[in-house]
Image: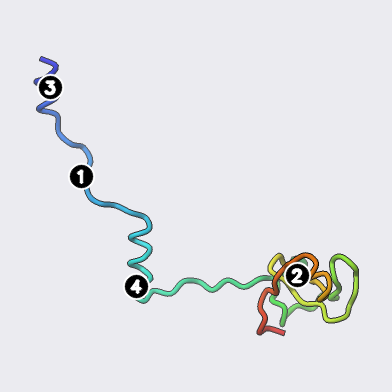
Amino acid sequence: MVRQAYRTRKTLVARSPLSYYGDRRKQFSEGRTTAVTSTLCSQCDQTESKCTCEKYCCFCQSQQDVRLCVDGLYYCPDCREACDIHLADPDDH
């Protein structure tokens, strides 16, 4: 009797090859664009070109050649190199 119930059981979910990554690759190949992200200043939430904050290095407080980095903080060239942190947007200045 148990075997009989097992054989007559219907499938509740259709079996199809579903893949998150396959669907994502298809979207990109169809020419859909993704949102471009930009790093914002951690104080005013603006890009480096629109930021009106007083710009100084978050470590040494230097004001010489400070630039916005990927973590939203400003770094001077020496601290940027020491911390191995990259600029948010090398073209934006």
Label of residue 29 in the image: 4
Few, some or many residues within 10 Å of mark 2 (<14, 14–19, 20+): few
Local SS, label 3: helix
User: Marks 3/4: CA distance?
Assistant: 46 Å
> Does 64 appear above or below 73?
below
Q: Indicate the quadrant where residue 68 lies.
A: bottom right
Q: CA distance from mark 3 to mark 2?
A: 66 Å
- List x then y, in percent, for residue 8: 10, 28
Q: Is residue 4 left or right of residue 88?
A: left
Whole-angstrom CA distance, mark 2 to mark 1, is: 50 Å
Residue 60 is situated, as x and y percent measured from the top left of the image, at 90, 68
Q: Which mark is residue 44?
A: 2
Question: Circle 1 sits on which residue?
Answer: 14
Residue drawn at point x = 66 percent, y = 71 percent: 39
Q: Using residue 12 as the reference point, say whether residue 48 is left or right of it.
A: right
Three-letter amino acid code of the residue under disc 2 = Cys
Q: Amino acid at mark 1?
A: Ala
